[in-house]
Image (cartoon, rainbow, N blue to C red):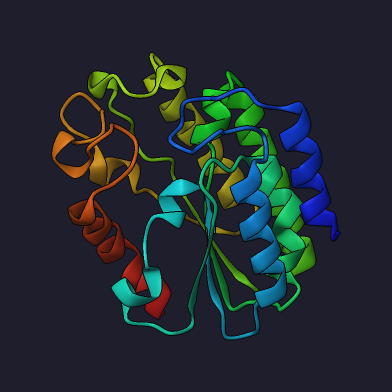
Amino acid sequence: MNKLTAIAATAVMTLLNCCGCGCEADARYNELWGQRASLFEMLGTDSTSIVFFGNSLTHGCEWHELLGNPHVVNRGINGDIVQGLRDRLPAVTKGRPAKIFLLCGVNDISHDLSADSIATALGELIGEIREQSPRTRLYVQSLLPINNSFGRYKAIFGKEQTVRDVNSLLRPIVEKAGATWIDIHSLFADADGNLRADLTNDGLHLLAPGYLIWRDALRPYVDE
């Protein structure tokens, strides 16, 4: 049993609380986390890889097809949290990838963590990426808005401002680290600052038109 599988197995035995963020039997790390983390460890990366690193929002797209780029690899896992990304970071950085596109934080919000603690944890993750693969070009994306009018995920009810606060706190951390900040929140927000209802069917995850907007926002950075 490798380290990532052991972490997941232990967590599944001890943490069975559903956070309501759209993943099945969501715990700190669930069976799916162990399965995909093990796969990603085996697949690795190389110096040509463009890594999309995150949670269900990243997991839910066939990025290499959408961008028409065979170097793009998806390293998203449904329900993942910042600590989960930190635990599986070596499988990403070991190959010294060309670029990493990072997005994480909404599941941490669902666990009632404060905006400050999430931004701090993401800052530590950014520092680890810099240390482990200093030549990798790092792009950090803002958290997307949420829309609780769908009534789907109780753990993010009333957390709209927390999403915005994480983004406000995270941007200067990213810029100080010399990474590239990409504001995608504003591209998906309606007049009230919530996730546009036409781009989702559950208030959190994206339909195809949403991924097209996201693709168009990232393409210049992927291609540069």
Left or right: 101 with respect to 63?
Answer: right
Q: Tell me, yes or no, if residue 216 can be seen here.
A: yes
Query: In the figure, 45 relative to 88: above or below?
Result: below
Left or right: 189 with respect to 183?
Answer: left
Q: How many marks?
A: 0
x, y percent for residue 100: 56, 66
Left or right: 19 with respect to 185?
Answer: right
Query: In the figure, 19 relative to 45: above or below?
Result: above
**The N terminus lies in which quarter of the figure?**
bottom right
**The C terminus lies in which quarter of the figure?**
bottom left
x, y percent for residue 18: 55, 25
Query: In the figure, 158 relative to 37: above or below?
Result: above
Give whichever of 121, 60 is nearer the camera: 60
At 28% from the left edge and 33% from the top edge, which residue is drawn? Answer: 202
Which picture quadrant has residue 91?
Answer: bottom right
At 37% from the left edge and 40% from the top edge, which residue is drawn? Answer: 144
At 39% from the left edge and 75% from the top edge, which residue is drawn? Answer: 64
x, y percent for residue 105: 54, 37
Give whichever of 180, 209 is nearer the camera: 209
- Extreme top residue here? 158
Which picture quadrant has residue 108?
Answer: top right
Q: Tell me, yes or no, if residue 44 can be seen here.
A: no
Query: In the figure, 105 relative to 147: above or below?
Result: below
At 29% from the left edge and 64% from the top edge, which residue is drawn? Answer: 215
x, y percent for residue 43: 65, 76
Give whichever of 153, 120 is nearer the camera: 153
Which picture quadrant has residue 131?
Answer: bottom right
